[in-house]
Amino acid sequence: MCTVMTIVFALADASLLFGSALSNHLAVAVSMTMISAVVLTLVVGLLSTFRGVVAGAQEASIVVLATMTASIHSSMQAVDGQNESAILATVVASVVIATVSFGFACLVLGTLRLGRFIRYIPFPVITGFLAGAGLLMIKFGLELALGFNPFANLTIDTLSVGMLAKLTATVLMVFLLFWMSGENKSRYAIPILVVLAVLVFLLVVFLSGSGMATWVDSDWMLIRDAQATVYPPIQFSDFSLIDWSVVAAQVPQMGILVIVCVTGALVKINALEVILRTDVDQEKELRALGGANLIAGFLGGYCGFHTLGLTQIVKRMHAEYRLIGVLVSLFTLIAFVFSADLLFYMPRFVFAAIIIWVGVDMVINFLLQPMETLKKLEMAIVVLVVLLILFFGFIPAMIFGIIAGMFLFIIDFSRIDVIRRQYTGRHIQSNVDRTGEIRDILYKHGNELRVFCIHGFLFFGTSYRLVQQVRNNLETVRAKQVRFLILDFEKVVRVDSSARVTLSRLVAFADARNLTFLVSGAKGDVQVALQIAFCAEDGYRSPQFFDSLDHALEWYEHWQLNDLRVGAEHGRRIGLHEWVGFDFDKQLMNQMFQYVSSRTLAAGETLFRKGELTDGMYLVQYGSLDIFVATDEETIRVRKVGPGAVLGEVSLYLNQPATASVVATTDAEVLHFTRQQLTQMLLENPAIAAHFHERMARVMAYRMADNNRLIKARTDS
């Protein structure tokens, strides 16, 4: 099965490769396509990660090569003194060099593990290339069927019954190919159809009684004379005929071929991974392709890679063995020996129909179907790439496609919302431990604060969108009372020079609105860029910078509380009787003091460290302390606490190491309840112990409720 299909497509590819311009040398093209099929199926079949994979020439690569061949023929034919032998030698040399270049590129990409970078070519560009290749295949197929280029030479004089008959036979064959390749059709349908079409045509020739020569003279056959197998395609004596200046002129076209083939190969490899349900080593596949194409090139063949259709046949027939590649290679080599006799009896319309069939299928898959999913701008790029390929060639289309793809990326990326989250002071508060009364005050005035958390990469597009969003948000009716603005840049990875210019407008806007502007979370290069962008100019106030959003929120809350003339809560002292409750029995209160000890901390002194098993729990009487968690990259402040805060209770109740470290930020005093003292309290004064643990339950319930409120606020925002 695979051998028959390989031979059929090799003959069709040979017809496409040389076209009508070099049809007299079709046997040379057949030798090149056949030797490629022999080498690719053997080497890739043996070295691939997939078992039973079949490799061969692909539509896009053969179209690029056919375009290059036609270009060489037209340029050399226009020069006086150039003969067919020189043109043929130059064409073969160019195809071989292009194939070797593709093989070398695959080896390099596979060895250096760079195959993934080829995927950065925009999808509309690749789609446009494949659709353009499909239209070129239709064009080349019609040219092969009719024996001339109908798009350039169609006149009243060229119209004839014979031409209409060839066109009718080709169209009918294309229709049959589509019908036989439909769903629920036998896997044998296509090769059987091709064989039957050839046999029916030969029967018509026999019944006509006009003889084979008449049909040959009317250009119904692939070749005019039975040509002996030509191998190698170029003799050593022909090297002197090669026009190396023409070959050098095809280097850009060869570069296009490498890009198209590598991209196509990677797409096919990924598709095969899904079809065969197996993991794939992409680099190994590229190295296998590199070796196969280098050998094929040096033996006079042309490039190719994994085929989906034939490999699917192997999968459906449960024949996933490496022997498949060996047998297909062997049988194709045997057919190569008798290819001269095969060619003489092959009708043009059969292989022209195969080329058109594949071309129409590519146009449907890569031009018509994407219209339903691609955006209008992306579809416009696809259409323009196709038109450029048809009228100007692959190189202008590639240049335009890459440039258009870059602009498309910039436009789409500029539409990304870089504001990850936004809050008011009612939605978010610092990790400073405050009383319920203070929190209520901050909540009441929370609409005076706007917080914008930024993420991603800021360049001229995203930064302009950011500035507009901030301005629009602060110019609404509800935003009139806003007095404080915080921009958090913790998740921003980079700010380029154009973004700095755009962001600088925020300083003037904040100053005009009399906003207190705070910047948090910026580090490294991002901080340097923002300091340049936000530096004071023309008398504007520069924003203040903070290491984290939590510190910026703490600064805002402190300023807000001072402005509201609410005393600094961390400057007061709280007694044990206040924490336990004023309504608690005074006699029991006095007894409780025998179960607690006092400890004084200097600013910067550590109370306990993460991972330590604390001996009891602590009640802060005076001063402030920071609870923080240190990682390999940074130190994160979890909470700032003051008088009335309880520390170490998790370690006390669960008998586990502390989950965070606690350090005094000012001189502080704490009351220490050791594990031994609490056990003694439970044995000697159960009433005091019950009241103590009830109070602890309230503390932890309050913390849980507070955390749930913050989580809900951040989720809703």
Image (spheres, rainbow, N blue to C red):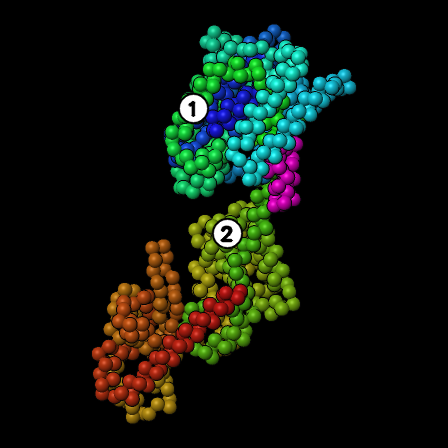
Question: According to the image, label 2 marks what residue?
Answer: 456
Is residue 373 within the magenta segment?
A: yes
Instruction: Assess whether mark 2 and mark 1 are in contact (beta carbons under 8 angstroms).
Output: no
Q: Is residue 107 above or below residue 706?
A: above
Residue that numbered label 1 is attached to? 329
In the visual, does 556 lie left or right of 592? Answer: right
Q: Quadrant of residue 684?
A: bottom left
Q: Earlier in the sequence, mark 1 or mark 2?
A: 1
Q: Residue furthest right?
A: 156
The residue most toward the front is 207
Give the Cα distance between marks 1 and 2. Answer: 52 Å
Q: Residue at x 47, y 64 (%)?
A: 552
Q: Nearer the viewer, residue 626 or 396?
A: 396
Question: Where is 666 relative to 687, above or below?
Answer: above
Q: Which sits in the foreground, 328 or 552?
A: 328
**At 60% across and 57% down in the image, what residue appears?**
469
* Residue neighbourhood size for the residue with mark 2, other residues' Cα within 10 Å, grouped as few (<14), some (14–19), many (≥20): some
Q: From the viewer's side, name the closer residue of 235 and 652.
A: 235
Percent position of residue 218, x then y: 67, 14
Res 415 label? none
Residue 336 higher or lower than 508, as above or below: above
- The answer to which quarter of the image holds residue 154 is top right
Please tell me in which quadrant of the rendered image residue 632 appears.
Answer: bottom left
Segment colored magenta? 360-388
**Residue 227, position in %: x, y?**
54, 11
